[in-house]
Image (cartoon, rainbow, N blue to C red):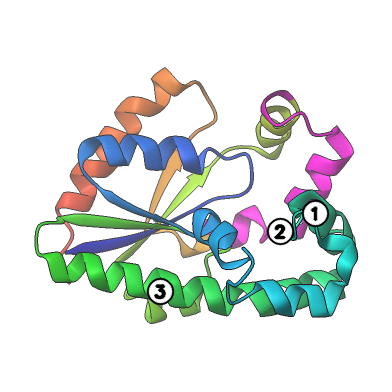
Amino acid sequence: MRVAGLTGGIGSGKSAVSSLLAAHGAAIVDADEIAREVVVPGGPAHQPLVARFGPGVLAADGTIDRPALAAVAFGDPAALADLNAITHPAIGAVMAARLAALAGRGDVPIAVAVIPLLARHHVEGLGLGAVVVVDCPTDVAVDRLVRQRHMAEGDARDRLGAQAGRAERLAMADYVVDNAGSLEELRPRVAALWDWLCRLPAG
């Protein structure tokens, strides 16, 4: 099985690219989906988050209120570091287990680990054979966040600023998908990416 990491800044279009790859036949393991799973009551990150950030991050039903948690964490570098220290190991453990299960099946040609904050330790820890970066100009990403997620422009720029820099991501890339345009422009670019992934050495 070939395993690639897929990353990009918020608003870059990682979800669109991963959906198109899934249509080609890739198995998708998405860190954002797992992030929601590990914070449910009883999940490995739920109680540590409540202990660190207090009951103000809980909704009435006892689940983590993600907007409330984001409001606390994304404006404070120390709080964001604590959030990441609690959630990232739990997410990584689930991702590794799911990739191992896919490899064990023997019928999955390509798995794609979608990781917004992909770093060098993910490449080694998850056995990534390649890093794919979905890229677009910052102003395009901000526009998407404002239009599609209804964020205030200032909030969108703050979220982008809290993530790894664009140049830093591109420096890690084995393959870059330009997603500055429309979905129709993206389709042939993802088809070309799929062809490239199919030529990677199997792990």
Residue at x 86% of width, y 54% of height: 71
Q: CA distance from mark 2 to mark 3?
A: 32 Å
Residue at x 48% of width, y 64% of height: 172
Q: Is residue 164 left or right of residue 161?
A: left
115 is within the stretch colored magenta: no
Of circles 1 and 3, which is in front? 1
The residue positioned farthest toward the front in the image shown = 61
Q: CA distance from mark 2 to mark 1?
A: 5 Å
Circle 2: element type: loop
* Residue 18 position by quadrant: top left
Circle 1: element type: loop
The answer to whether mark 2 and mark 1 are in CB contact below 8 A is yes
* Numbered range of the magenta stretch: 147-170
The residue tagged 2 is 63
Residue at x 90% of width, y 62% of height: 56
Q: Position of residue 3 (x, y in %)?
A: 27, 63
Q: In front: 101, or 42?
A: 42
The residue tagged 3 is 123
Specify the label residue 95 is tagged with: none
Of circles 2 and 3, which is in front? 2
Upstream in sequence: badge 1 or badge 3: 1
162 is within the stretch colored magenta: yes
The residue tagged 1 is 59
Where does the N terminus fall, quadrant-wise?
Answer: bottom left
Circle 3: element type: helix
